[in-house]
Image (tube, rainbow, N blue to C red):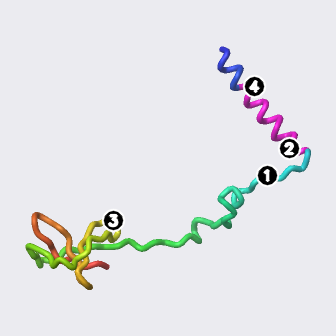
Amino acid sequence: MKHRSCRWLGGAGLGLALLAADAAGLPFAGDAQAMADRPAVARSDAAVIPAVVVKRTTTYVVSLPKSCVRTRVGGVVLWRCGKTYYQYYNNRYVLVVIN
């Protein structure tokens, strides 16, 4: 019973503090100010990030040149060798096409 009365008193105290601040004319942070002064943007106006599609081809290689760099595209780990991308699959690398 003691915990319930403490919660009620705490909530009542917070409510009284908010009423007193409002009566004194103190400003409250609005939604846009609470987001580190970023302007409020409607969800429909937000930028849409297109999905990245990685398609495997039927071209496989056993090893890659040493110049290939491991990278992540759309959450998928790929190996970039110049303008060509490969994905490690079943102990070999498959040529992939990114759309």
Q: Tag 1: residue type?
A: Phe
Q: CA distance from mark 1 to mark 4?
A: 23 Å
Q: Position of residue 91 (x, y in %)?
A: 10, 64
Per the image, the residue denoted by label 2 is 21
Tag 2 near tag 1, CB within 8 Å:
yes
Going 91% across and 46% down the picture, which residue do you hit? Answer: 24
Q: How dense is the environment of label 4, judged by Cα within 10 Å: few (below 14), some, or many (20 and up)?
A: few
| In the depicted structure, whether residue 5 falls above or below residue 38 | above
| In the depicted structure, whether residue 58 falls above or below residue 10 | below
Q: CA distance from mark 3 to mark 4?
A: 49 Å
Element class at badge 2: helix
Per the image, the residue denoted by label 1 is 28
Q: Which residues are magenta?
A: 8-23
Residue 75: which numbered mark, if any? 3
| Quarter assignment of residue 54 | bottom left
Camera-side residue: 45 or 34? 34
Q: Answer left or right for 71 relative to 46.
A: left
Q: CA distance from mark 3 to mark 1?
A: 40 Å
| In the depicted structure, whether residue 5 falls above or below residue 46 | above
Going 69% across and 63% down the picture, which residue do you hit? Answer: 37
Which callout, 4 or 2, points at the residue further toward the start of the chain? 4
| Quarter assignment of residue 83 | bottom left
Which callout, 3 or 4, points at the residue further toward the start of the chain? 4
Q: Is residue 45 magenta?
A: no
Q: CA distance from mark 2 to mark 1?
A: 9 Å
Q: Position of residue 6 (x, y in %)?
A: 70, 22
Q: CA distance from mark 4 to mark 2?
A: 18 Å
